Image: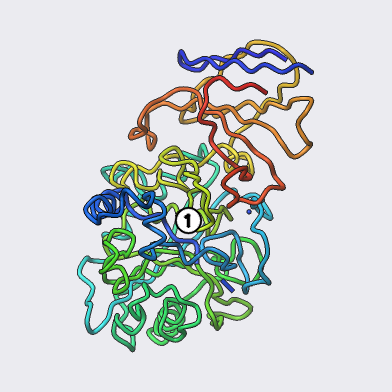
Amino acid sequence: MKLRISASGWRCRCNSKHGMFPCRVPPSPDVMAATFMQYQRSGKSGKLSFRQYLVDIGFIDPSIGVAGMDDAVQFVPTPGGPEMLAIPAQPVLGEVQVKALLVDFSDRPGVLPPSHYQDLLFSQGIYPTGSMRDYFKEVSLGKVDVVGTVDGWIRMPKPYSFYTNNESGTNWNSYPHNAPRLAEDAVNAALAGGVKFAQSLDKFGRGIVTALFIIHAGRGAEVMLKPQQGGEIWSHKWNLRNPVEVAPNLSTTIYLTVPHDCKVGVCAHELGHLAFQWQDFYDPNYDEDGAEWDGSGVWDLMAGGSYNGSSARPAHPAPLHKLQHGWISASTITSSGSVKIKPYTATTGHVYKLVFPKFEPTQYLLLESRKRVGFDFDLPGEGLLVWQVDEIKEQFAPVAPGLSLSKQMDAMI
């Protein structure tokens, strides 16, 4: 098969002869740059690769192997096993209601007014770089509307250090000294203070609050260097250890937590886990498995793209994620021909799905055209992206993950 595809001047020629244990945002680029400088000064650069150095200093993601943390799991953690490429249980369309609780502590009082978070998360067309609501409206082509309310500040019964436990709050076995206990205390304190949880917070009719935001006073560990990380909570999506009933037939079982100085990128990334059932697509164990995989990098919300524009203008999600929810359309190509892929606009979005004779039924390529406009403004470039998909592969298999971004513009298929 010979196929020529063009997108904004880029061309790709393909030739063929006949997936109890939270989801965290990746560390910020500034943190990784500073850690690299430490690596160069350590005297170990001649003995260890940078990724081996990260493992050596314990810079690994606690969400690895933890069902329910920064993944698509929406209920109590299930027995472990290979984490396959997640396919959402049902598409998300229409209104998604979020309940945001601002929580502070005796040793970390809240600073910014609730109106700041209402504008950051739920305003429409007025936030200078775009709100989280604006983001999902753009990437879904208007098919999703993220709305919500902000309550707080709500004082927690324990100090901030109680919940971080010098472990960034991400050790499940340290309960009650962790973030799941913080989420439980936040919900219980909100109820005691008269905060109401409407049945409409249950988007999927499962009896659980679909999108519970815990915004805490304090910084995010993901923007701190290793020695200071333990004393701050690392932004993540996770499960409550003990679900809290907030209304008849409605409980909180999952949550996300972000710091007081959060921006749209980290909020949208974690909501991607929480409501849209997406996984991380970066290398979250930093070569702990002996293999290197950079994921989809700055081109994807669920990878480093959550930090684009200093996290104020995160990248769009991968096209697979948009397709899974019916936000964009795809044309399947099985024979030779020429096509021109048009970039996304405010009202249209179309990609091409390539299926080759030697592919398995679960394997295909997705081709999209990206331009530096809207929330994609801070991409490092524009043009054609080729995504490799295998729906039955393990997501964290660096050699052949379920979803990966091709690094070659000319691929021999």
Which quadrant of the structure image shows residue 176? bottom left
Q: Nearer the viewer, residue 236 or 312?
A: 236
* Residue 170 placement, left or right of 88: left
**For mark 1, does the 10 Å Cα neighbourhood hold few (<14), some (14 to 19), or many (20 or more) residues?**
many
Q: Amino acid at mark 1?
A: Pro
Query: Residue 349 placed where, x, y %?
Result: 55, 29
Query: Residue 24 placed where, x, y %?
Result: 44, 61
Which quadrant of the structure image shows residue 319? top right
- Locate the N terminus and report the quarter of the image it occupies: top right
| Residue bearing the label numbered 1 | 284
> Is residue 70 among the parts visible in the rendering?
yes
Mark 1 lies on a secondary structure that is loop
The mark total stands at 1
On screen, residue 45 above or below 57: above
Residue at 54% in and 66% down:
201
* Residue 22 placement, left or right of 230: right
> Is residue 194 among the parts visible in the rendering?
no
Q: Residue furthest front?
A: 47
On screen, residue 350 above or below 94: above
Query: Residue 33 placed where, x, y %?
Result: 27, 48
* Residue 2 placement, left or right of 153: right
Query: Residue 283 placed where, x, y %?
Result: 48, 51
Residue at 43% in and 73% down:
170
Which quadrant of the structure image shows residue 259? bottom left
On screen, residue 153 above or below 62: below
